[in-house]
Amino acid sequence: MSNAIIFKRQKAEIGILGTGSMGARLAAMFARAGRSVALGSRSPDRALAIAHDLALPGLVGGSYEEALEAEAVLPAIFIRDGLFDILERNAAALDGKLLIDISNPYNEDYSDFILPWDTSGAEELQKRLPRTRVVGAFKNVFSAVFDNPLFLGTPSDVFLLGDDDGAKQEFLRLAEGTPFRYLDAGPLINARAIERMTMITGALGRRLGSYPRMNWRLLG
């Protein structure tokens, strides 16, 4: 009789789909905060290489399917590149899970959105995935901010959106130790304003020479 021991990889706390500028940076941020992260790519070798280069405890690379096994899932995929279709095909894997939506529905040249004014990326995901708990976050944060997140030593703001208070609390637990201040910005319908404001602030930042390392801080 064989005495071999079979090891099963522990389920990650966060699975990130996509290895572009946002996906890789968010994976690194959550791993540095002590979360276990599965970074998934359509090309698993790319995700493996990124995880190897970052060499952060708790960060592993692999496929979309492996990332979808995590307790919470964060897609870093543009809507224009098929985000809705990818997630709808994997709806069963997302049942009951927290889905962290960072999407802004930009067109190819970032001059406009591909969704109408009376909806948002977050609302469309919740409509398509009714058994998944969707929150919106990081919609206002440009990728360069993750490389140097403090402004004069001060964290900037991330606006958190969602219709499920428990889902928001779960997100905030996962975000503990990350270098941002998280503000509850209300229900998912408010993503319409956050997404549109991101497009406006991006245009202003380009004119002022502060893009892409720029973010919001609500003062009072």
Image (tube, rainbow, N blue to C red):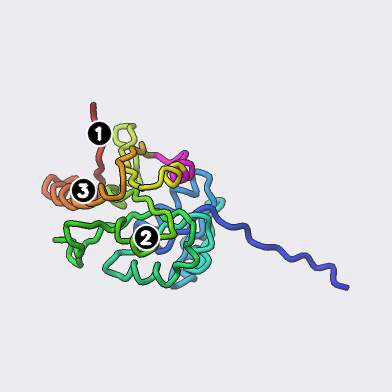
On-image quarter of the N terminus = bottom right
Q: Nearer the viewer, residue 117 or 127?
A: 127
Q: CA distance from mark 1 to mark 3?
A: 15 Å
Question: What residue would you read off at disc 2?
Answer: 76
Q: Which residue is mark 1?
A: 218
Residue at 45 percent across and 53 percent down: it is 98
**Disc 3 residue type (three-letter):** Ala
Q: First in sequence, mark 3 or 2: give its number.
A: 2
Q: Earlier in the sequence, mark 1 or mark 3?
A: 3
Image height of 213 relative to 105, above or below? above
Where 121 falls versus 212 (above or below)? below
Q: Position of residue 12 (x, y in %)?
A: 55, 56
Residue furthest to the left: 207
Give, as a single range, the part of the protein colored magenta: 170-179
Q: Residue furthest top?
A: 220
Residue at numbered disc 3: 193
Q: Position of residue 76 (x, y in %)?
A: 37, 60
